[in-house]
Amino acid sequence: MIAPALFADGVTVEARERAILRDVSFSLDHGERVALIGPNGAGKSTLLRVLAGILRPAAGRVLLDDVPIATFDRSEVAKRLAVVPQQTALPFSMRVEEVVALGRLPHEAALRGARPSDRAAVAAAIDRVGLGHLMGRDARELSLGERQLVLLALAVAQAAPVLLLDEPTVHLDLRHQVEAMELLCDLNERDGTALVAVLHDLGLAAHFFPRLVIIEHGRIIADGPPAEILTDERIRETFGVEPALVRLAAGVNGG
């Protein structure tokens, strides 16, 4: 039996004597595509940070390739797992291609710098995300949406088999939201990249992800295909919206 690419077992996270996650277990298979959805403050981004090894839980464990993620150093984690945050502040001026090239750092040989293969990976990532027109620009001067695409290109250049994304479409207009989702699907289906994305847009999640995990009050309350878990009752009770709004965007059948 092949071990999951990523596995969280009984994870609890506390802050200021309050449980943000409560005994959460989650498994991501190799090549799988999963969206984490739920109301604001449910614990989605916290779970993503735990899965990435950025946040250590008060209880439970996370396994990356069947090995406790806490036993890896960050460079080893970065070879296996890439993270696209909601937004990252750049401390100093960097051109777009220089930011994308950061994705190759885990692969570069010590003291030797970038190899031709690294430069080719950066160029391919920029082309794949469609950022050629931004080459040479200072990434700090870009719009929030453009910067989000640069971070996505960085993760593509990193070429890790697992990709975690926290609201990857948050600053994008509608066209770029769809294009970003199509890119993620292509990475998953053509490259075999396993994906976990935190999303607020139920329509995008249901349309582009075959498996949804709903988190509410720090617990997983549903896990499965969109048509099975996004029932009319759950959409109303958990998300406080009319189901028709979700179904228009995603084409999910009522239940």
Image (cartoon, rainbow, N blue to C red):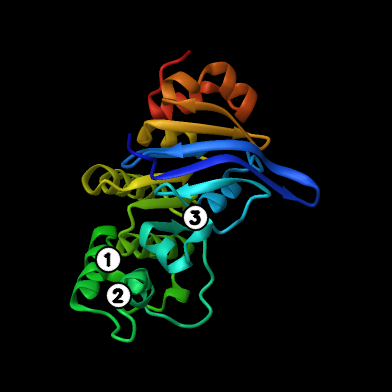
Q: Label 2 crowding class (10 Å Cα cut-off): few <14, some 14-19, many 20+?
A: few
Element carrying mark 2: loop
Q: Tell me where residue 187 appears, x and y as whole percent.
A: 28, 49
Mark 2 vs mark 1: in front: 1
Query: Can you identify the residue that label 3 sits on?
Result: 69
Quarter of the view holding residue 104: bottom left
> How far, Cα to Cα, is label 2 from label 1?
9 Å
Element carrying mark 3: helix
- Amino acid type, mark 3: Ile
Query: Can you identify the residue that label 1 sits on?
Result: 126
Query: Can you identify the residue that label 2 sits on?
Result: 135
Q: Tell me where residue 11 appears, x and y as whole percent.
A: 61, 42
Which quarter of the figure is the N terminus placed in? top left
- Amino acid type, mark 1: Ile
Q: Earlier in the sequence, mark 2 or mark 1?
A: 1
Going 36% across and 36% down the picture, which residue do you hit? 208
- CB within 8 Å, label 2 to label 1: yes
Q: Tell me where residue 102 appears, x and y as whole percent.
A: 38, 73
Quarter of the view holding residue 9: top right
Element carrying mark 1: helix
Q: Earlier in the sequence, mark 3 or mark 1?
A: 3
Mark 3 vs mark 1: in front: 3
Q: Label 3 crowding class (10 Å Cα cut-off): few <14, some 14-19, many 20+?
A: many
